[in-house]
Image: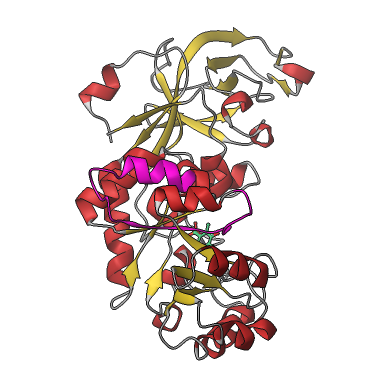
Amino acid sequence: MHSADTANRKTAGPWVEVDLAALCENFAMLRRATPGAETAAVVKCNAYGLGLAPVAQALATRENCRTFFVAYAEEGAQLRAALSSSAPNASIYVFVGPLPDTLDAFDDAGLIPVLNNADQVRRWISHKPGAPCALHVDTGMNRLGASVDDLSELAALSDLNVDVLMSHLACGSEPDHPMNSEQRTAFEKAAALFPKARRSLAASAGALMDASYHFDLTRPGIALYGGSPFDVDDGRIKPVVSLKAPIVQMRMLAPGETVGYGATFTAQTPTAIATVALGYGDGYPIAGSNRAFAAIAGERAKFAGRVSMDLICLDVTGFKKPPQVGETAEFFGETIGLFEAAQACGTIPYELLTGLGGRVDRRYV
Ligand SMILES: *Cc1c(COP(=O)(O)O)cnc(C)c1O
């Protein structure tokens, strides 16, 4: 994942390296895993924190991805602009659907709404009768989506042109959870009312489950970005993102001395501490304090003391090669997996990636 270009770039603070080739390999892997279905890319939340434009452009130009999902209309407008030369005709779906004051954004950027309830359906068909849309049917998650009880009434509306019927799994992170097949059955029943619509049930988890979850269109997000959608790591997914930061100070502690706010780490023996320029202000969770690991030149170092806003201290006692100021510490990437880092912080890869702050430089390799 190292290029000379990236390695030579000097910085005072943290950065992420986004491996766009690995992103594209994950897209291709998901496509191979779901033969017969189209693979879309979910690029909401700034492509899970990695940068909307570079991610979408890479998928459009290298993998010929032509269908994208975002959460909000504003994200759709940004995506349309980002794809203006690489994929001007891409289909951009907006999960939250049209709200009274976002209808204009749908028109201006040529966005396709995901309609989530009867109100949104009425709003859309009175705005643009017969214009294509997706319809989200709730099959048990009770978050977004039209109730199954409303579907026959909606199916009878002649101005409603459903081109994708979708639903979302509540327990995809546990493939054996009984709710998955219950939702699939409810979804198939709903789909029978919309025979012309393409069917979409699978996010990353569903795409990596058996073929009965694949249907016509899949909507992976996290697996594109190197994160497992499951409660365990998944070897089919290539790492995409590395979070790195420079060591800004080295210090030796005598036994009994402490580290950081609250003095929560006490040296038991002579202890070498490396202080690194990354903190919770950059999105690294404070829950990693005294628990998580980083790696310096491939050697693992445990966090010593509490994560602070701009700094994290690492216990590098006994390192084969004593770390130097200016050397790079990796918080996830080649040595420390994204899944491991998320677990050490009591969170999930999704939150770790999307939480990366604005101060973290995004570099594309
Ligand atoms: C975010 C989202 C996805 C993508 O989910 P991943 O688990 O990241 O693959 C797909 N569908 C809907 C409705 C979503 O909200």
Q: Which residues are magenta?
A: 75-101
The answer to whether residue 195 is left or right of residue 308 is left
Question: Would residue 95 be visible to someone looking at this image?
Answer: yes
Residue 70: x, y in percent?
48, 52
When asked about the image quadrant of residue 7, the answer is top left
State the scheme by which the image is colored. Answer: secondary structure
Q: Is 137 in front, or is 234?
A: 137
Quarter of the picture containing the N terminus is: top left
* Residue 176, position as x, y percentages in the image: 57, 78
Q: Is residue 208 visible?
A: no
- In this rendering, position of residue 16 left or right of residue 268: left
Residue under the image location 32 percent in, 49 percent down: 23
Residue 246 x/y as whole percent: 44, 17
Q: Position of residue 112 (x, y in %)?
A: 45, 60
Residue for point 50% across, 86% down: 191
Q: Nearer the viewer, residue 158 or 83?
A: 158
Q: Is residue 311 above or below residue 325?
A: below
Location of residue 259 (image quadrant): top right
Q: Disc count in the image?
A: 0
